[in-house]
Amino acid sequence: MAENLIKPENLVYDKTKVLTDRVLHYCPGCGHSTTHRMLAEAIDELGIQGETIGIAPVGCSVLAYYYFDVDMTEAAHGRAPAVATGIKRVLPDKYVFTYQGDGDLAAIGTAETIHACNRGENFLIVFINNGIYGMTGGQMAPTTLENMKSTTSPRGRDVKTMGSPLKISELVASLPGTYYVARHSVHTPANARKTKRAFKKALEYQKEKKGTCLIEVVSNCPSNWKMTPIESNKWMEENMFPFYSLGDIKAPK
Amino acid sequence: MKELRLMKGNEALAEAAIRAGADAYFGYPITPQSEIIEYLMAQNTEERTGMAVLQAESEIAAINMVYGAAGCGKKAITSSSSPGISLKQEGLSYIAGAELPCVVVNITRGGPGLGTIQPSQSDYFQAVKGGGHGDYKLIVLAPATVQETVDYVKLAFDLAFKYRNPVMILSDGIIGQMMEKVELFEQIPRSDKEYDWATLGKKPGKDHVIITSLQLQPEEQEKVNLRLQEKYREVEKNEVRYEAYNTEDAEYMFVAYGSCGRITQKAMEMAREKGYKAGLIRPQTLYPFPVEIINKVAGQVKRILTVEMNTGQMVEDVRLAVGGKIPVDYYGRFGGMIPSPDEILNAFEQKGG
C-alpha cells in the first residue's frame, strides 16, 4: 500500500478520507470523478465530514452515495432540491449539498431547482452540465447545444422544434434567494482547483446561512459524445465554453 | 391537560399534528383541505413547538421534502386531496422503498381527473393497494369523526415509526369540513431521538448512513421485497382496527368506513327499527383490512351490503374476506354525492334485506 512506501514527510498529496475506497463506476476521463474528489476535498479541508448530508440524483451520479463518505440520501429524479429542503428545515445547522446532472436538475427537476433557489434554501447545489443524458445512453438534455447530435437529436438539436439550450446558472442567478452562482470545469488541474475553491466558499456561505449556492461544472461525456477523453475535453473547450462561459455569475461583493 | 374544543376537522387535524410533536409539515393548497396548512401557519408553529411548516411549490416537492425530513428520523407530515395525492405517489413509493416513516393525509374528493371538490371515497384502491409503482403498502387509517381524526394523527406517527412505513389517513371532505366537539390530547414534546438509520451526519467510527430505494441486483431487490412483505404480515397481525355494531344476533351485515360508516350506522338502526336483525362493521384500518371479523360474520349472517361513496371498491376486499360463503352486495353514491340513510335502507331492502 502507498502509505507503506512513502514516508509521511514526503507525502504531498493523498486520497481524501471523505471519499470511500469503493471503485468509481464512471467512464474513463469523465468529469464526475474529479468533481467528486474536489467536493470531497472541500468537505475534508473544512472539517465538516460529520456534519454534512448529501443528496444523490438519478442519472450517472445516482450511486454518488457509495463514494462520498458522508450521510447520503438518494432522491427521485429531479427532486433533490426538495429533499434537501426537507433535510435543511429540520436540521438547519448541518451542511447539505445536492449533486445533480443536467437532465435531473434542468429538465425534470426545474421546478424544484428554481423554487429552492427562490426560497434561498441554505444548501449547495452541484450541477454537472455535460449537455447530454449519460446514464440512459446519450439522449438530448435541456443543455444540449444547438446542432449538437444526440440519440434523440440525431441530425443535431434543432432549436426551432427542440428548444434552445437552457442556461440554468444565469436563470437562478437572477433570483434574490441565490447568494453565489459560478460556473467552472475540472478538465485541467488549474480548473479543478478553482472548482474546489468555489465549493469551499459555497459551504462557508452555507454556514453563514447566506442563501442558495449553485456551482455548475461544465463537464464532458466521452462515452456519449463518442470521443476519447482528450478529444472530449478539447471539444468542450471549443464548443461548450463559448456558450457556457466559465467564472462567477453571481458573487458576493 | 386534555382539552375539549369545537373544531373543524381539518383544523383539528392540524392541531393534532402540532400536539403529536411533529417536526415538519410540507404541503400545497388544494380544496377541501387547505385549512390544514392555513391553521399551521396561523399557529406560528416555529415559535410554539419548533415545528417547521412550509408551503411547497408542488405536491411533488412537498412529498419529497417529507422524504428528506423523514430520512433524518423526524416526524414529517403532508396533506392533500385526491388529485394532489396522485402527484405524491412517486414520493410515497420511494419513501416506502427506503422504509422511512411519515404521515400523509388525503381529504378525498370526487374523481377521476380534477373531479369535484365534494366528499368522496373514490381513492380507496389507490390508498390500500399501494398507489405508486412497485410492491408496497401504506398503513391506511379511516376516521369517521373529528375525534378519530385527531386520535389517528397520533396513532399514525406511532405506527409510521413502529414499522418505518408511510401511514395514510384516508378521510374525506365531510370529516375535513364539519365541526364537532373534540377532546385534544396533551402536547407531546418533539423528540430529539437520533435513529441509527437516519442521516444526521456521519458518526466517528460508524459507517455513513445511506438512504436509498435503489438495488442494482435483482437478487437484492427480491430480498427487499421479501423483507417488506414480512413487515406487512406483521402489520396485518397486529394493527387491524374496526368497530362492530350489533354483530351478536345479526342476520344481515353492513360494511362501511369513514363518513359513510356513520351514515350507514343510522341506516342500520333504521333497519333494526323495521325488524331486520342488522349489524355494521366499520373498518378503522383499511390496510390492514379486518378480514378475520368479516369472514367470521359471513358464517353467521345471510347477506352483506357494502356501502361506499365510490362505484364499488372496498366491496372487492369484503368479497375476498367472505370467500364466497354468502352474497356480498354493494350500494354507493359517488362523484361528490353523499347517500342518505333512507337511500341506504331502501337499497338494503331492495337487495332482499
Image: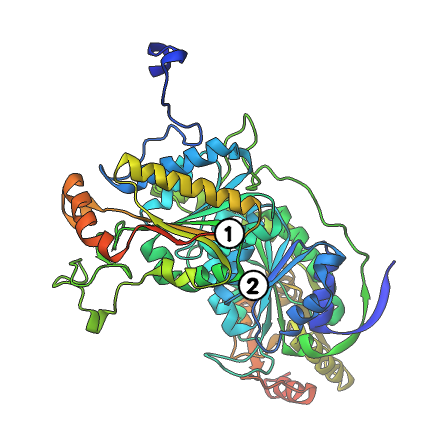
Q: Looking at the rendering, in which quadrant would you find the C terminus of chain B?
A: bottom right
Give x and y (percent) for residue B233: 56, 49
Per the image, the residue denoted by label 1 is A84
Q: Residues within 10 Å of mark 2 (few under 14, many from 20)?
A: some
Q: Looking at the rendering, in which quadrant would you find the N terminus of chain B?
A: bottom right
Question: Camera-side residue: A160 or B230?
Answer: A160
- Residue under mark 2: which chain is it in? B
> Please, what is the three-letter code of the amino acid marked with disc 1?
Ala
- Residue under mark 1: which chain is it in? A
Per the image, the residue denoted by label 2 is B321
Q: Which mark is residue B265?
A: none
Q: CA distance from mark 1 to mark 2?
A: 43 Å
Give x and y (percent) for residue A228: 14, 41
Q: Residues within 10 Å of mark 1 (few under 14, many from 20)?
A: many
> Please, what is the three-letter code of the amino acid marked with disc 2?
Ala
Give residue B173's quadrant in the image.
bottom right
Give x and y (percent) for residue B318: 56, 68
Give x and y (percent) for residue B79: 60, 66
Q: Is residue B72 above or below residue B139?
A: above
Q: Residue at x 27, y 49 (%)?
A: A135
